[in-house]
Structure formats: structure tokens, C-alpha cells
Image (tube, helix red, strand yellow):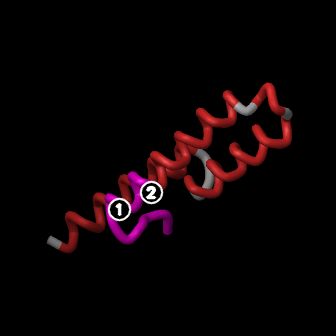
Amino acid sequence: MFCSTSVTVHLLRGLGALGLVIAAFFLEPLGMMWSGLALIGAFLLMRGCPMCWTMGLIETLYERRKKS
């Protein structure tokens, strides 16, 4: 349900989401709108909360092991 096509893609999505969360803190002085947009982008990249992203990583690793 949550798993990506590859571990690399999943980790890159997580790295992008982390970058957007960090950017949200730096964009705070510019206004809540920019900070909120960065957080929404991070939420979309993670396909939900950080726990959803972690479960997706576990499922991706499980599917990868099952195929080999």
C-alpha cells in the first residue's frame, strides 16, 4: 500500500520532505503561507505523516527481500 518502486526512490522522497520541513522553519519570517506550503509539500512527498513514510520504507524493503 505504501511501498515505492525502489528503496532509492523512497529515500529520495524522504530527503526531499526533510528539506521542505527544514525550509518551513527558515521561511517562517516570510509568512505563515510559505511555511505552510512547504509543510504541505513535505506531507505530500511523505504520502502522509513521518510514520507513514517509515512504514512505507519497511514495506519497500520487505518487498525487495521477497523478490530476491
Stretch of the chain drawn in magenta: 1-12
Direction from residue 31 to residue 13 in the image, left or right:
left
Give the quarter of the image for residue 20.
top right
Mark 1 Cα shell of 10 Å, populated few (<14), some (14-19), many (≥20):
many
- The residue sitting at 85% across, 33% down in the picture is 31
Q: Can you say whether 10 is above or below 22 in the image? A: below
Point out residue 39 in the picture as x, y percentages from the top left corner: 70, 43
Q: Mark 1 points at which residue?
A: 60
Report the amino acid beneath label 1: Thr
Residue 54, given in percent of the width and then of the height, sits at 45, 47
How many badges with numbers are in the image? 2
The local secondary structure at tag 2 comes to helix
Crowding around mark 2 (Cα neighbors within 10 Å: few <14, some 14 to 19, many 20+) is many
| In magenta stretch: residue 10 | yes
Whole-percent x, y for residue 60 in the image: 35, 62
Question: Residue 9 colored magenta?
Answer: yes
Labelled pair 1, 2 in contact (Cβ < 8 Å): yes
Residue sitting nearer the eye, 1 or 22: 22
Task: Please say if 34 is above or below 57.
Answer: above
In the image, taking residue 50 as reference, residue 59 lies left or right, namely left
Amino acid type shown at disc 2: Gly
* Vertical arrangement, residue 30 with respect to residue 8, above or below: above
The outermost residue toward the front is 30
**Circle 2 is placed at which residue position?**
56
Judging depth in this view, the residue of 61 and 10 nearest the camera is 10
Q: Which residue is drawn at 62% across and 53% down?
A: 48
Label 1 and label 2: CA atoms lie apart by 6 Å
